[in-house]
Each structure stands twice: as C-alpha cells, then as structure tokens.
Amino acid sequence: MKILVAEPLAAAGIELLKAQPGWDIVISNPKEYAQHLEDADALFVRSAVKVNAEVLAKAPKLRVIGRAGVGVDNVDLPAATAGNVLVMNTPGGNAVAVAEHTLGFMLCMARSIPQASASTKSGKWEKKKFLGSELRGKTLGILGLGYIGQEVAKRARGFEMKIIASDPYANAKIAADLGVSLVSLDELYKQSDFITLHVAITKETNKMLGDAAFAKMKTGVRIVNCARGELIDDAALARAIQSGKVAGAAIDVFEIEPPSADNPLLALERVLATPHIGGSTGEAQEIVGVRIVEQVVDYLQRGVVLNAVNTVAVR
Ligand code: MLT
C-alpha cells in the first residue's frame, strides 16, 4: 500500500501511518507530490494542493483522499466520485482554533490593536486616535451555526454580547442552549454590530455578502471572514468600507490565495488581513492530522467509513 502525504501533517499522524505493516509512506510537498501519484493508494492534503480531474487522472490506483481540515473545496468531488475515490475530512477538528481567531479579529477591530501597535512602534503616541469600543452589549450575527459558529458563540458569551445566528440547518435546541437567537438573514443583517461567516461555499452562499447585503446592514457593522473568500464580493466590501457603511473588516481567507496585490481590500487601513491561519494552531493541526490518519487507516484496513463527503463503492 503506498500512502502519499502531499502537505505537512502532524508528526503523531505520520507515526501512525508508519506503524501500519507493509505500508510505504511517501512524505512530499505541494510542488513535488504529483510525481508519486501513479501508484498511490491514499493521498493526504490540507488546502494548498488542488485535487482536480487532471491530478486524479494521474492516480489510477487512488482509493481515498484524506483532507486534514474541514473545507473540501480544493478537491473536485464529482471527479473523485466518478473515479471511485472516497474523500474524507475532519469536521470540528479545528473549530476552536478558527473560533479563537474570529474573536481575536473582533477585539483587534474594536480596539484597533494592529494599527495602534504599528503606530506606537513607529514612535507615535496617538492615544486620542485609537478610542475604541467594547464588545459588551453589541450584537454578534453568526452566519452558520455549525461546529465553528457554535464555538464562536460560546466565546462571545464571555464578552457579554447578544448573539444571533442565521442558519437554515441550525439545531434549535443547540442554539437555545448556547443562548443564541435564530433569525432570518435579513434580520441578522439589520441587527448585527459584528457579522462573522461560518458557512461553506455553495451556489447560495457564493458572494452572499455583496452590495445588496451590505445595503441591509447597520451602519458601522464590522465583518469577519475566517471561512472562505468566495463568500464576499471584495469590490463591494471595499466600496462599503469607503462609504462608511462598514466600519471594518477582518479577512483570513481569499478567493485566490495568496491574494493578488491589486485586491481592493489590501490597501484599506480598516481591513485586517491574515494568510488563512484560522485553523493553524499546533493543537488543531495535531487533532486534524491524527484524526484524518485514523479515519484513512480504518477505511483501508477495515472498510470503515467516517466523515466521508462523497459516496463510492467500498473496495
Ligand atoms: C479548513 O477548511 O479546515 C480551514 O479553512 C483550515 C484549512 O484550510 O486547513
């Protein structure tokens, strides 16, 4: 059995792979992994490797793709299914990491921490310029109350925020237990002081934050996106910030990563940007790395299918 690891994976996960008798483990990287595809039975990726039809065609023996993380938008699922390749992910494994990044972004925006730090280190003392606002008493609108949205809600409660969420699939009991009121999308836009996105990319969510959505929001709203870049129309967000409708935005994800230098958001002082590191904590990488290896081992050794995002004939 040949196992191809195309992106960094937790050491404990690699050890577990190496412990499987007769398995040949190839540790590669996104630039070189393709040369090992020909006889690979399993492929491990994070988000840098784009597993499209062309890549799958080079891997005729491939039985399973393990995605260490949640989003599987870097894998062509119909092509994988057509090739009878099972795709698995690790939902919830990095939820706390992403939630903490989200709260960090909210505090940074409310208190202008990155800007104040840069100003102070440059020798200025701009105490008046950096008058902040508190999270306490503000309304947080969570778009998508899945694993990550729920972790965000738990933490926002500690800051004494009012929490509302919009999610057609939300579990009403979980929401109630978390002290979250479920509302319509329009109501969330209307009421929120902060809006944070925690939904997957679908036809319905693609560019859901565009001119029409911003027009429905409160003046002075702040936006956090630690989910996927495609959820926001960047040009529309830049316009909304320049007009003062949106007071700030904190963006961890971009439609094209890394974003091009002419991305309209990058030039704006009221935009904070990080390089898709929401899920990048040592703890989260350990969890998703070990979990995905356990799942793939279970599948290849025992035919057990857990957290599959497509359906294929087990072989
Ligand atoms: C995820 O989908 O798990 C997060 O965006 C982090 C990552 O891409 O690895």
Image: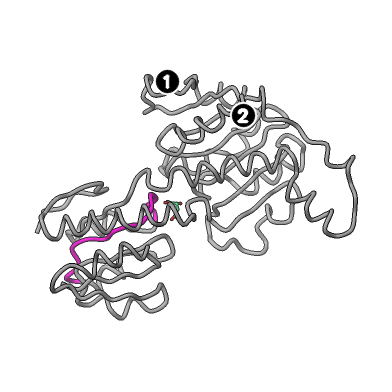
Residue 263 lies, with reference to residue 145, above or below; the image says below
The type of residue carrying mark 1 is Asp
Q: Main secondary structure of the magenta part?
A: loop
Task: Pick the residue in front: 252 or 130.
Answer: 130
Quadrant of residue 66 in the image?
bottom left
The type of residue carrying mark 2 is Phe
Q: Pointer 1 and pointer 2: residues touching (CB < 8 Å)?
A: no
Write down the region rendered in magenta: 60-73
Q: Residue at 39%, 58% (x, y): give it.
A: 74
Residue 166 lies, with reference to residue 63, above or below; the image says above
Residue 251 rendering spot, x and y as whole percentages: 60, 49
Quadrant of residue 189 in the image?
top right
Q: Which residue is mark 1?
A: 177
Q: Is residue 70 magenta?
A: yes
Q: Which residue is mark 2?
A: 159
Q: Regarding mark 2 in the picture, which secondary structure is present there?
A: loop
The C terminus lies in quadrant: bottom left
Residue 162 rendering spot, x and y as whole percentages: 59, 22
Residue 198 rendering spot, x and y as whole percentages: 48, 39
Labelled disc at residue 134 = none
Residue 21 lies, with reference to residue 239, above or below; the image says below
Q: Residue at 30%, 53% (x, y): give it.
A: 291
Asked whether, in this view, residue 211 is left or right of residue 149, the answer is: right
Report crowding for label 2: few under 14, some 14 to 19, many 20 or more residues within 10 A (C-alpha): some
Classify mark 1 as within 8 Å of ligand 1 or not, answering yes or no: no
Asked whether, in this view, residue 8 is left or right of residue 163, the answer is: left
Task: Pick the residue in front: 269 or 114.
Answer: 114
